[in-house]
Amino acid sequence: MPHTPPFSILVIARNEAHTLPRLAESLRDCLASGVELIVIDTGSEDETAQVARGLGARVELAGDRFHSTLTADEAAAIDRRFARGGEAPLVEAGQRLFDYGRARQFASERASHDFVWHIDASDVLLSVDLDFLAHTVRSGRAHSLSYFLEAGPSRFRVARFFDRRRFAWRGRVHELPVGIGGAAAAGTRVECSDAQLSLRHIHGQKTRTYVAGLAVMAMEDPEAPRWMHYLGRELRFAGRYRSAIGALRGACRLSGTWAGMRSRSLDVTGQCWEALDRPAAAAACYSKAARLDLSRRQPLLRLASLLQRRGDFQQSVAFAAAALTLPQSNAYVDAAENHPADPHALLYWGLFWLGRREEARTHWEICRRLAPDDECYARDARLFTATEADGPTRPV
């Protein structure tokens, strides 16, 4: 390549000395071509800064400037606002908060180039076409680029490669780049193919600490449905189901909540009702979610799964088959839809119990092809070879 690619790679890191060499190895071609790598060290207690410098990165020591501590008054206000159903306090005074949005914005401002690419220390580059990226940036025809990020079994698009003059980071957690001056000012986005750019995120052992940050965002920006939606999701992950339902209902009530987000909030609400052993309430949520956004598989799959566990195989098969008529989503919030075998699994289990074993076998064979390492699918070979069988290995 005749010239250094005109963009900077930015990484926020704290105690990531063990992950940075893996990231740098995956970025080997980028670094060899002269791409700028900047690591923002946010108060590491290990050798993060030294390791980053040894890998050729420019290191900025940010210390604790993006950390804050939840006061007793703030903690009490969060519990008054969001705790429901006698659940224990959601947050604690003295809890440390990290402002990811401010940290990423700080990184953007330190870059030598206007185009910046934000990645995590725990990411690994799968593929890159440096000629394509350099040409796209220099051409001026794009102001941001989206690409696929793999995370566990999920795969979805993110757009963290952009012109910093047109975007600024927003949000303490579940942060996102937003157009400066509105969506129109954000300009044109190019969608990269897998060969042009793709990454994998490798989950580590760090504890999720998003509830407090999202609760603070929801109180600071009460008309933005994003924070209430993600707060509800995090509360569900934490097992605070009634509080989660309250937050998700709040997200649905906000005037700025578009139909797709209402559908997704109802999805998570249904999961909470299932956890509280309220299947009828869960089914109502999934049904409404499906009606609100006819493009989404997820509520249909959840409804099919719920009905199957309750023994209604006829209806379960109908909803799973309907889900298969819709395209697979690549949105982050629809991560569960990125398990391509799931509709076929629901179909072969339901069809088996309905006595339609040849049809069931067809969908089981698809599951085996899509997920060859899944032991449960492998064990279910007995369903189609034995004269008698107890049934599928697991319910959905």
Image (cartoon, helix red, strand yellow):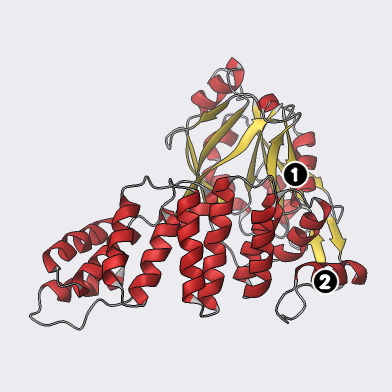
Residue 153 picture location, percent across and down: 43, 58
Determine which of the numbered discs, if any, sits on residue 80 in the image: 2
Pair 1/2: label in front: 2
Q: In the rendered view, would you say 80 is above or below 391?
A: above
Q: Badge 1 is on which residue?
A: 170
The residue positioned 52% from the left and 45% from the top of the image is 26
Q: Residue furthest left?
A: 387
Classed neighbour count for the residue bearing mark 1: other residues with Cα under 10 Å, few (<14), some (14–19), many (≥20): some
Mark 1, secondary structure of its residue: strand
Asked whether residue 6 is in view, the answer is yes
Residue 185 picture location, percent across and down: 70, 25
The residue positioned 41% from the left and 53% from the top of the image is 297
Residue 154 picture location, percent across and down: 46, 54
Mark 2, secondary structure of its residue: helix
Classed neighbour count for the residue bearing mark 2: other residues with Cα under 10 Å, few (<14), some (14–19), many (≥20): few
Three-letter code for the amino acid on which mark 1 is drawn: Arg
Q: In the rendered view, would you say 396 is above or below 250?
A: below
Three-letter code for the amino acid on which mark 2 is drawn: Arg
Residue 134 picture location, percent across and down: 56, 23
Asked whether residue 94 is in view, the answer is no
**Count of residue discs:** 2
Q: Residue 173 is drawn in which quadrant? A: bottom right
Q: Nearer the viewer, residue 36 or 204?
A: 204
Q: Is residue 75 left or right of residue 164?
A: right
Q: In the rendered view, would you say 38 is above or below 243?
A: above
